[in-house]
Amino acid sequence: MIENTQELDIFFKPQSMVIIGASEIPGTFGTRYLTALVDFGYKGRLYAVNHKGDEIHGLKIYRSVMDIPDPVDLACICVSAKYAPDILRDCLHKGVKAAIILSAGFSEWDEEGKKLEKEIVDIAGKGIRVMGPNCFGTYCPSGGGTIVPGGNFPKESGRVSLITQSGQLAEGITAPSFGEGVRYSKVASYGNACNINEADLLEYFMEDGDTQIFSSYIEGVRDGRKFFNIARANKGKKPIIIWKVGLTNMGAAAASSHTGSLAGETVIWDTFFRQTGAIKVESREELIDTTTGFSCLPTGIGTGIAFISGGGAGTVVGADACEKAGLHLPSFSEKTTEKLRELLPAAGTSIKNPLDMGTPHPPLDLFTSVLEAMAESEGIDVKNKVQFDGLGHALRSF
């Protein structure tokens, strides 16, 4: 639990970092992470620690974090699990404020790994915050830091923040999102959540002024009551998008072996979504699409939707989808109704909401006029303007 959410800032905007496990050998995990930070353009002080080697990326390789002459904000530990507790103790004695343990082989692995993770928890309790183990780290363009494979990530900051227990999906979600125009304020791959968990991160992002949209990939929850209370208190404020996995028997078993998570039951999570207003998604693609959608909407938008279809079946499908998503279809105003009657023939169309134009291939000028008339009706909260090319293809909507 965090007593002051500002203490998590250090994971995203450290003034100095040490990569423990970086070496002269290309391809090692620590070297890959150091290289990603250099490629991304981290502007703070960087240090490397390894028991052997002299120099990497022009940086001296120290034998221990205790040998570094300057203060260090954040340590990134990339060594075998069995060495992590002793290294974390050195970080604590050095006065390092926080550590990310990227190494795997802890509670998700075996009984010995569980003992090592318990040791990590005990050390963290003495005054150093820990993210992980078994994760990819953090990405924050404004802080100049990035995850292990993120040396080429965009340097522009956005208004979305993402947490993911999976290291792989820290990249697997963000990378395709970039192609959709989404830009992130912060990303946290938090792994086994031995010290900082999803409830801590949710609380942090709900108070973070740079975060307007919260998205997440979650296998299990360490502090379910706190997570629920924070989400419920935020209802109607920032969108909370959750891809919750492990709700089948086989999925729960896989989650336990991946991050040591207790996945929970479907009925409990259905209740959670209903009472908090959080948005449930069920695939990576749906998470990305939903995040993209919210990124394109102005803040404070309502739920009134005008739906248009080229046939009757589309209006039924659309109405079902809107209701399931918690949206509603307001009746058109009399002014809008009269305008639509002027534009559309009576036979084969329906000028109710959802609207049936009677043809899936209307002329561009007619389609545009119908959209404009619908957008002018009271109660329609989303006003879309669609730009077309010369062939009548929609280029984008905003």
Image (spheres, grey):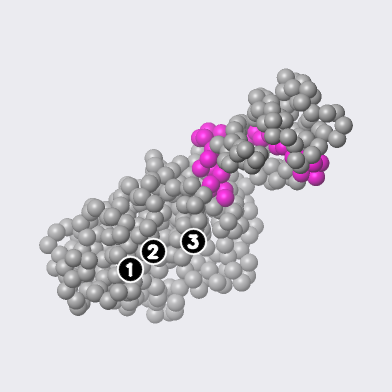
Q: Tell me whether circle 3 and circle 2 mark residues in contact (CB < 8 Å).
A: no
Give residue 198's position: percent from left, percent from top: 45, 56
Residue at the image point whose x is 20% and y is 63% from the top: 47
- Classify 285 as above or below 157: below
Q: Amino acid at mark 1?
A: Arg
Name the residue carrying label 3.
Answer: 172
Per the rendered image, the range of residues in magenta is: 289-316
Give residue 33's position: percent from left, percent from top: 32, 65
Q: Earlier in the sequence, mark 1 or mark 3?
A: 1
Instruction: Report the side of 348 relative to 369 (left or right).
Output: right
Q: Residues within 10 Å of mark 3 (few under 14, many from 20)?
A: few
Q: Amino acid at mark 2?
A: Pro
Give residue 354's position: percent from left, percent from top: 75, 36
Name the residue carrying label 1.
Answer: 32
Residue at the image point whose x is 16% and y is 68% from the top: 60
Q: Residue furthest left?
A: 69
Q: Tell me whether circle 1 and circle 2 mark residues in contact (CB < 8 Å).
A: yes
Dot 2: what SS?
Answer: loop
Distance, label 1 to label 2, CA atoms, is: 7 Å
Instruction: Report the side of 25 relative to 280 (left or right).
Output: left
Q: Using the image, tell me which numbered label, if any, was put on residue 18.
A: none
Observer-nearest of 141 and 204: 141
Dot 3: what SS?
Answer: helix
Instruction: Report the side of 62 relative to 21 (left or right).
Output: left
Give residue 18's position: percent from left, percent from top: 24, 63
Name the residue carrying label 2.
Answer: 149
Observer-nearest of 232 and 67: 67
Residue at the image point whose x is 41% and y is 61% from the top: 190
Residue at the image point whose x is 53% and y is 69% from the top: 255
Q: Residues within 10 Å of mark 1 (few under 14, many from 20)?
A: many
Distance, label 1 to label 3, CA atoms, is: 17 Å
